[in-house]
Image: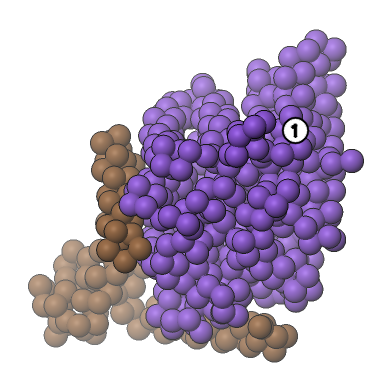
Amino acid sequence: MNVLPFLIIVPLFGAFSMPLIKLISEKFRDIWAVIISAITLCVAADVFYTIWKTNQIIVYTLGDTTPLGKGVGFPIRIVWEVDLLGALIAVTIAFVSLLAIIYSLEYMKYDTGLDKYYTLILILELGMLGIVITGDIFNFYVFLEIMSIASYALVAFRNDTWEGIEAGIKYMFVGSLASSFILLGIALLYGQYGTLTMAYLSHYITREPTFVSKVALAFILGGLLFKSGAVPVHMWLADAHPAAPSSISAMLSGLVIKAGGVYAIARILFSIYGISLNIRTLGWIVIFFACLTLIVGNAMAVVQTDMKRLFAFSSVGQIGYILLGIGIGLAAYGTKVGQIALAGAIYHTVNHALMKALLFLVAGAVLHEVGTKNLNELSGLARKMPLTSFAFLVGAAAIIGLPPLNGFASKWLIYESSALYNPFLAAVAVLGTAFCTAAYIRVLFTFFGKESEKVKEARDPGKAMVIPMIILILAIIIMGLLPWQINDSIMLPTAKMLEESGKYVLAVLGG
Amino acid sequence: MFGYWDALYFIYVFIIGLIISYILMKWGEKASMGTRRVGAGTKVYLSGEDEDEVIPQFEHLRGYFTGRHVMWGLIRGINRMFIAFRREHTGLLTDYVAYLLMTVAIILGVLIIWG
């Protein structure tokens, strides 16, 4: 049985049954959210395992066995097409979402309207899952909007503070603008080629790459760079991510900018445009924005005094590394260097989701216990909240890229490939890491410094908040201890499958 | 691909870096080269922004000259970059539109010429 549709059906059912479940009891509503996200994780893991084992792309047509219309030679049905990259990101999304929901049980205990909260969080999850499994570009846009609208609402969820409302409205305005650019690009592609199925689009663009297809790509890429928080269109991120409840910040920084940003960029550039345009040019466009993002994001993190804002800027910086990997993967397409860079980018996407989720959960624990996220007031937290401080230590060390943690493995692949491709790029990447180190060491000094008045009453949070942090710590350490195994058995095959755009096209055209 | 020894080498270099920075910090404090202790914590001043424009033991670089000296100029340059970053604006919708349009224009320009 093909379980792929359940990746959408389960969270959708969970989200819309939430108001009814709430009528039974509030406790059952919380447990229901955990059960739904746990089932979603099982489905995602099954999809990933099937693709990984068989090395075959899964294609699923909604309502039929083929996307082609009856009696016509062009596709009219929505296609879901999942390769290893999509499945890997889906597992990451389901895993981090489950932890964020478990964390929310305690973190959001004193908030009201939690049925709306859990409905939105499940809709956010299904939006992201939809993005990574779809093979239809308009369907991709629909899921992107589902994800975006849920995140606008979640950023402004705590509407008793102006910070949340202002950030939510700003995020909504500018996010919609970027979405409209993406939609314009999709409309141009549809007008030119008469299809929305990605595989067919790739086929037609390769046969006849027109000027319109380039204009469409510019609009889509501009919008997606915005969604991924790349410089110079990153400013919204520093407002939106810190203003949300920390469990949501973990999902926004860990997942949303990946699924709706870098994943989509990789999918469109490799699977749709790949060989039809000058691939070196495509690569260097991405590398240019990656270098800007690397430097500015990490340097901006250094000067922040708000802990969550620092983490948000750090996310911008880390997106730079992922984009650098994708850029080199394109520019050095077909070579070993390109493949390593792409594997590094994919590895870092997964790693960053774990590391940043952990760091935002730590920030949430601090905010929950101390009531402030201002670094100037958090001195000496380590003695009062040892477990939380240890979690921060692991997260920070991993994101800086200290061995033997997972961040080292993925960053090393990116450094190595960039040094082999163009040493200047490696220098830029290392400079970004220097800024990143400075930013996190500042927080570390604050945590381990002299005890301040504010933290006197602080203590580690309860089990529901600690368990997700411990699971993330374990995941970070385990992924750091087995870098070769993970890279050789998962990341490299994923990169290879993404590179083989012909296989992606044939999976639909041939079926 | 990376190996086990690369990882150890990384830690080794990092620890040496930490030790050197600590020694430098202690030396800087002792020699009080542009370093002041303020209040409960320690605040490090870059001498370029010192109000009386004098660095102890660097009196020969007094006044406006301080900022022009190559070393201090460089440090001041980096400091100014961070000051500029600190003045970040996350403001107007028109700015966002402008940046987004610029991004699209850059991509389109490159694609038309070299794509």
Amino acid at circle 1:
Asp
Instruction: State the residue at coordinates (66%, 20%).
Output: A116
Q: Chain of mark 1?
A: A
Eyeballing the image, is A224 above or below A289?
A: above
Report x, y in % for residue B8.
68, 85
Report x, y in % for residue A373.
53, 44
- Counting labels gives 1
Q: In which quarter of the view is residue A134 placed?
A: top right
Instruction: State the residue at coordinates (74%, 29%).
Output: A63
Q: In which quarter of the view is residue A371 placed?
A: top right
Residue A352 visible to the viewer = no
As drawn, the chain in purple is A
Residue at the left extreme of this rendering: B64
As drawn, the chain in brown is B
Report x, y in % for residue B21.
48, 81
Q: Which residue is mark 1?
A: A64
Q: In which quarter of the view is residue A292 placed?
A: bottom left
Instruction: State the residue at coordinates (28%, 51%).
Output: B105
- Which residue is nearer to you in this view: A65 or A331? A65
Instruction: State the residue at coordinates (26%, 43%).
Output: B98
Image quadrant containing the N terminus of chain A? top right
Left or right of A410, for residue A55:
right
Q: Secondary structure at mark 1?
A: loop
